Image: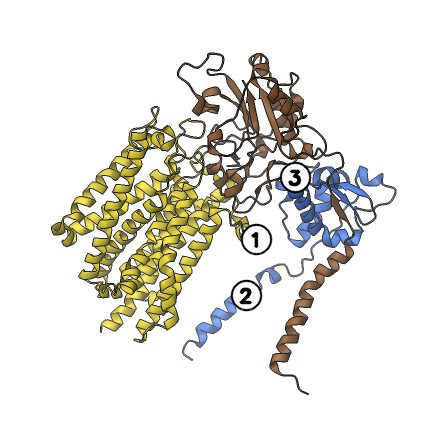
Chain colours: A blue, B brown, C yellow
Amino acid sequence: MRDFRYILTGLAIFVAVVTFPLWINAGKAAQPPDPSLDTPAINQLPKKQCIEATDYMRQKHMQLLDQWRTEAIREGKTVYTASDGQKYQISLENTCLSCHSNKSQFCDQCHNYLGVEPDCFSCHQAPDGG
Amino acid sequence: MPITRREFLKWGGIVLLGLGAWPTVRGLAANRSTYEANPQAYSGQKWGLAITMSTCWPHYQAGCRKCFLACQREHNIPDIDNPKEEIKWIWTEPYERAFPELNQSYLNPRYKGRPFIVLCNHCDNPPCVRVCPTQATFKRPDGIVAMDYHRCIGCRYCMAACPYGARSFNFQDPRPFIREPNPAFPTREKGVVEKCNLCAERIDQGLVPACVEACPYGAIAFGDLEDPTSNVRKALYAVGYAIQRKPELGTKPKIYYLV
Amino acid sequence: MLEKALRGSKAYWGWIIFLLALVSIGFACYLGQLSRGLAITGMSRDVSWGLYIGQFTFLVGVAASAVMVVLPYYLHNVKEFGRITILGEFLAVSAIIMCLLFVIVDLGKPMRLLNMILYPTPRSILFWDMVVLTGYLLLNLITGWHALEAEAKTVTPPGWTKILVYISIPWAVSIHTVTAFLYAGLPGRHYWLTAIMAARFLASAFASGPALLILLSFVIKRVSRFDPGREAIQKLAGIVTYATAISAFFIGLEFFTAFYSQVPAHGMTSLAYLFWGLEGHGKLVPWMWVFVLLLALALVLLINPQTRAQEKWLKLASAAVFFGMWIEKGIGLVIAGFIPNPLEKVVEYVPTLPEALIALGIWAAGFLILTLLYKITIAVKEETVQ
């Protein structure tokens, strides 16, 4: 047990490093995201609904966008028929962002809160920049 | 009867498999949505172009660059003023460079050094598609050699494979070099290869390629090479002879030049 | 056994720290490349592969060190190689790790590397290169490590490792063949479009890998109490002699086909660019003539039995083979494939400083891995000698 002291010190340092993000942020509650729907296009909608139900979009928009890009780019299928029968052109710029023209208020809020960095906007252009 | 270990593992495995498949089952059940092509989309088997340079030349000499500008605007092509890092979708090369194997010692001055419009040949047998390790470059059913920029890893094997120099690599972020951004079309990002897509996005909406539409003199004929009544076939049969770039390499280019 | 790498002389630790410093400099430059893109390199849309892929290509050849000791030992019962098979295998391990690192730093989108596995594409030679290189890495790591462990415990290695050794022999041929196919299967790259490309790769690999192993054996003899053995080194020298002569012959074949046929599309212009310069461009000409001189020197020293048997001449000859092949394969072969470009224009390539430092950092990382593996091996061998 000669090395007991070293092992214990090593373990303590390890635990401290691993839990660093927890205690450095302790007591600082992050602002919960509040995605804004206040865009001219959305305000004009009679019923505020995205192409699918809000809950579905909240949970699955990444899978949906992923499938959109596969169908549009690789299969040439550029028309999406939603569950309610409504048809949409598959395009991040021309469909999604035409309503959600406020990327920083809509997309970025949640993404920043959750610490995810999707790289959609390094190619796709948001109307409010980015 | 107590269950044996073998039984336990067997049923445990089946249950785990079922759990793993559950999201798929649920996803399939919930999603009643469908995907289809735009009914207005042009459908063809082998899109191709026939370029009549003699129609183009007088206007080109007078400074017409309408086809290049239309392409540049449509696709957010950066204007990088460095020949080593340039992004080129459609441009001109002198005859001797576009057709090095057809360069003759006593070439008719009508062709010598004259500019020829060059772009991706959308080969019927494309070497770039063959070498791409991720299928980021692929051939669509309509013959367009397309790229999925989401999937490109930037290995540049396709650039080594292309015998036409039609591929460009984004050595740096292209955005600062885009003159008039077109918000309807994505830009590219640093680290991916890009090239002419024969305006696949326009063809899918029922529009002809931007360069074809932009030419007021009809120098570029577009159409389905398999369709005898198409514009491109009519153009090919209208004059004496059509040439292709490096046909001896077996790539079967789909861009023809009428001479 | 890993702890054996932690005990060493001051010189050992000095060498380790020197390598770590080079690795850090390379890594810092790579971070710059990640944020600014491959624009920091000398590559262009015309010469779209450069120093990185050149080093990768050359190092695939160095990995042949393993098969050239394993094959004679296991198939022809050449007992002298018994002492150095592990050295050959570990040299292969570090060479392949360098290869993989060079491919990764060459990617424009390294974070998407897994796409190669997520969308496996058997028609792409690059896919197969990934398969054979990682396979060869694992084969050598597993067989080398088990052999060393068995030696430390003075028992015979487990029987199943012998099966892996036999698999590794044809596998070694596959890594050179597949890497050659990366180049030899492209239309319009005349310099590469040659059926003997794979044969050339094998010949130059069997020259450069064992040549480095000879040099390393002399280093080991000097810094440790383990002597790889004069017979083993002389046997390796024989292999290097044949492989170098065959390599020179193959390059001669390329010249004949290109220049006697006078068909430009058989590599005439690229060879002219390399050896004489083309349209006033000739940045690689001095390099290629150094290569010719090194190869000639090596052949004179190796073919002559008197000089080959003498340590100092053999060292010189091995170094000449290694650096000569490095010029031919690590620089000339890859770059000249892009010159002239498909539009018959000459656009030259010169690596930039950060690019060279990244390459140096990867070499240092490879030598660091090699040093650690060799340190453990030598410690085990010194124990068994006592």
For label 2, the residue is A16
- Tag 1 secondary structure: helix
C59 horizontally vs C79: left or right: right
User: Which residue is farthest right?
Assistant: A46
For label 1, the residue is C118
Image-quadrant location for residue C64: bottom left
Q: Amino acid at mark 2?
A: Ala
Chain letter of disc 1 in the image: C
Q: Amino acid at mark 3?
A: His
C289 horizontally vs A112: left or right: left
What's the residue at 33%, 69% (across, down)?
C148
Chain letter of disc 2 in the image: A
What's the residue at 55%, 43% (across, down)?
B152
For label 3, the residue is A124
Pointer 2 and pointer 3 on the same chain: yes
Q: Nearer the viewer, residue C116 or B237?
A: B237
Check contact, mark 2 vs mark 1: CB within 8 A. Answer: no
